[in-house]
Image (tube, grey):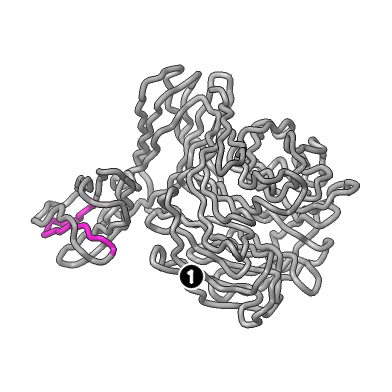
Amino acid sequence: MKFLFPIFLITGLLVAQTNVTFLSNFNPYPSAGYNDIWGYVDGAGNEYALLGVRTGTSIVNVTNPANPVEVAFIPGPNSTWRDLKTHSTYAYIVTEGTTPSSSRGLQIVDLSQLPATATLVNTIDTWFTRAHNIFIDNGYAYVIGTNNGGGMHILDLSNPVNPVRTNYYTGSNYIHDVYVWNDTVVAAAEDSYDLISVSNKFSPQLLSVSLILPGIYAHSGWMTEDKRYFIGTEEFNVRDITVWDLQDRSSWNLVVSSWHMPGSSAYVHNLFIKGDFAHISYYTSGYVVLDISDPTNPQLAGHYDTYPQNNGGTYNGAWGCYPYLPSGNTLISDIQTGLYVLKFNASIPVELTSFTAQVFRQAVTLNWQTSSEKNNMGFEVQRKTDDEFFTVAFVEGNGTTTEFKDYSFTDENLFAGKYTYRLKQVDFDGSSDFSEELSVEVTNPSQFVLNQNYPNPFNPSTNIRFNTPTAGFVNVSVFNLIGEKVAELVSEYLPEGEHNLSFNASNLPSGVYVAKLATESMNQSIKMTLLK
């Protein structure tokens, strides 16, 4: 499929838009200014942007990407810099600001009450009063760029509201940012990138150090999904983006010495990798996407300029980027104009229109549909185990077609637990791309279970499936968020087994609704999102 290169005229300014669809811009604090951004998904599948503001953190519901809505604001020290990440149902926020002293250090925010609100539950300044960045992996937070040394604090989040520090690492220069996976850290340490083992969280060990490249500042970066290549960003517009081969963990092999945004002198900022693409906030050039299917030869794949006034080397425009929402939408924070919700349209030969999962007792059925295909050999169905994806089946494709095609695969004999799936679409020439990830919960069939509706979000109909291990009276009704009943789907004696109901909301407005299952002995509920 060929790329499209449209140019859009907005408020009298030319906005470059290559393979990216604009969904919305939300600017709730225009006089304050913005910094970093992260994303979050609640248990009902609602999507949120955690938007750094100079005066705090704005939590924005972006489930309807065309209509972002702020649901909470967490005040914090006034600062140009703020970074935030999530773990479980909590957000962890650090900033360079220290005034007022009551909110300096590490802020911990409970997100479990979303979509209604979010609450600050703890503020800790025991180990540092200010910090530049934070990264969370596998139950540990890594806080870097702090006062009193600028090293790396490792915090155990087993108790998410009251972390415990296991170590303060100072074996590198000032650490500006880190990327962590399993027990390995890449630290952006001013002159070099340092590889650090944290297999022992009480005693990190320096493994290797990259070349010191003249004139650059090792700012940040991300590992490719196979954990072989590290793609770094240096911010000072000398080399912009470098690519390092880390197949041998004891040495750093520089395979791309410099990549700059074509036709622009903008400074690069932060970079994140999803599948074969690197998603980048590129200051005055805005949102930039690179095809890194061959990491040694990055190619421009997408672009949306959030700051069309100037593509020069100033610190304006896109600060942060988050490409990991299940919807496939990308969140951008622009320093001047706030939150952007964008959609990168990857140049893949298959247009995937839907990908859903249904749970039937001890099995998960995946269904997906394509609207067109080109040279499609088929799909690898992949399931995540121990943070890595493994192929569990291959489903043949339809080659080249412009007709809608439906596909299905059932993963059977599963134990109770959470399962995450994705599709790897493979061309006949071997090239490939990945779908969004889907997570489902397989439960014990001897229990009452109300499954999440599918599809969700929906318009106007959706299916609600539940299991009754014994026969009895069952009521399933739908309510709006102020508690008004809008539909009663069943209210009768039902036999044991699996049941499926259809809910048609064609007469209801867009919004979040609650489906409640009630029996003589229990009640369960799910949240459903109607988007028209």
Where is residue 326? Give x, y as percent. 47, 47
Is any atom of residue 135 visible in this view? Answer: yes
Q: Residue 467 lies in magenta, yes or no?
A: yes
Residue beneath the point at 37% across and 56% down: 44
Of residues 332 and 93, the one drawn nearer to the viewer in this rendering: 332
- The main secondary structure of the magenta stretch is strand
The single residue placed furthest to the left in the displayed view is: 493
Is any atom of residue 452 visible in this view? Answer: no
Task: Locate residue 482 relative to residue 343 in the image: left or right.
Answer: left
Mark 1, Cα crowd under 10 Å, few <14 / some 14-19 / many 20+, is: many
Q: Residue 399 lies in magenta, yes or no?
A: no
The relative height of residue 16 versus residue 214 in the rendered view (above or below) is above
The single residue placed furthest to the right in the displayed view is: 214
Of residues 383 and 357, the one drawn nearer to the viewer in this rendering: 357
Of residues 470 and 475, the one drawn nearer to the viewer in this rendering: 475
* Residue 247 picture quarter: top right
Where is residue 77? Give x, y as percent. 64, 74
Q: Which residues are magenta?
A: 466-481
Three-letter code for the amino acid on which mark 1 is drawn: Asp
Residue beneath the point at 58% across and 39% down: 275
Quarter holding the C terminus? Answer: top left
Residue beneath the point at 55% across and 41% down: 10
Task: Locate residue 508 relative to residue 148 in the image: left or right.
Answer: left
The relative height of residue 162 versus residue 420 in the rendered view (above or below) is below
* Residue 255 picture quarter: top right
Task: Locate residue 247 relative to residue 505 in the image: left or right.
Answer: right
Residue on which the image places disc 1: 110
Task: Locate residue 151 relative to residue 270 in the image: left or right.
Answer: right
The relative height of residue 504 versus residue 375 in the rendered view (above or below) is below
